[in-house]
Image (cartoon, rainbow, N blue to C red):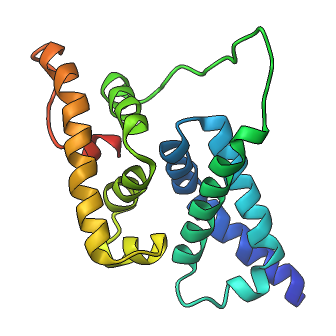
Amino acid sequence: MSRALAADAEYTEYVRAGLPQWRRTAYLMCGDWHQGDDIVQRVLTELYRNWPRARRADNLNALVRTMLLRRLIDDRRRRWARVLLTDLLPERAAPTAPDATERLDVVAALRQVAPRQRAVLVLRFFQDLTVEETAQALGCAPGTVKSQTAKGLATLRGLLAPIRDDAPTTRQTGSAPASVC
């Protein structure tokens, strides 16, 4: 097998293994599956173009996670330039997860959390990153990650408390970020 074919096969295997997690992360960060898929696709295109250099990275998963976060931030910054005028609302797929109602409540509440706090919560509780790994991915100090985590969790709990108070007694309550997974 030629060197180029071997590199393509390695890239394909890596993407196949990580794609579901990257899609979920992008969705949780931006709140829209279509936009999240677009962002992941752009990251994968960039990764493919730079694959020979990228695959030599010490921590390839951290590199891809950083690329994804930067693309999400760039997309937010450029959003004002894209205006879509239409009289039709987009169709949305029905959730298929067993705990769909609770999951939707958490995702809706997560959208109301400040972007930096949301990023910290997703990385810490969805990606299971350590404080140090999260700090490195976001380019900030570990103390900032800790304070943003505390503030984000407090906000999330406050947003979910009224929902949980109105919920039937059969619904489980627990740590908000854990139910996202």
Q: Residue at x 23, y 29 (%)?
A: 160
From the viewer's perspective, is 7 left or right of 40? right
| Residue 1 visible (yes or no) | no
From the viewer's perspective, is 115 left or right of 35? left
**Which quadrant does the N terminus fall into?**
bottom right
Give coordinates of residue 107: x percent, y percent. Answer: 40, 34
Q: Which residue ends up furthest to the front in the rendered image?
A: 80
Q: Relative to residue 33, is residue 11 depicted above or below?
A: below
Give coordinates of residue 5: x percent, y percent. Answer: 86, 79
Q: Quadrant of residue 47?
A: bottom right
Give coordinates of residue 22: x percent, y percent. Answer: 56, 56
Q: Relative to residue 109, is residue 168 depicted above or below?
A: above
Q: Residue at x 40, y 45 (%)?
A: 114
Q: Quadrant of residue 32?
A: top right
Q: Relative to residue 149, is residue 170 depicted above or below?
A: above
* Front-most of residues 157 and 43: 157
Give coordinates of residue 73: x percent, y percent. Answer: 60, 56
From the viewer's perspective, is 168 left or right of 112? left
Q: Which residue ends up furthest to the left in the rendered image?
A: 169
* Front-most of residues 86 and 174: 86
| Residue 54 visible (yes or no) | yes
From the viewer's perspective, is 74 left or right of 135? right
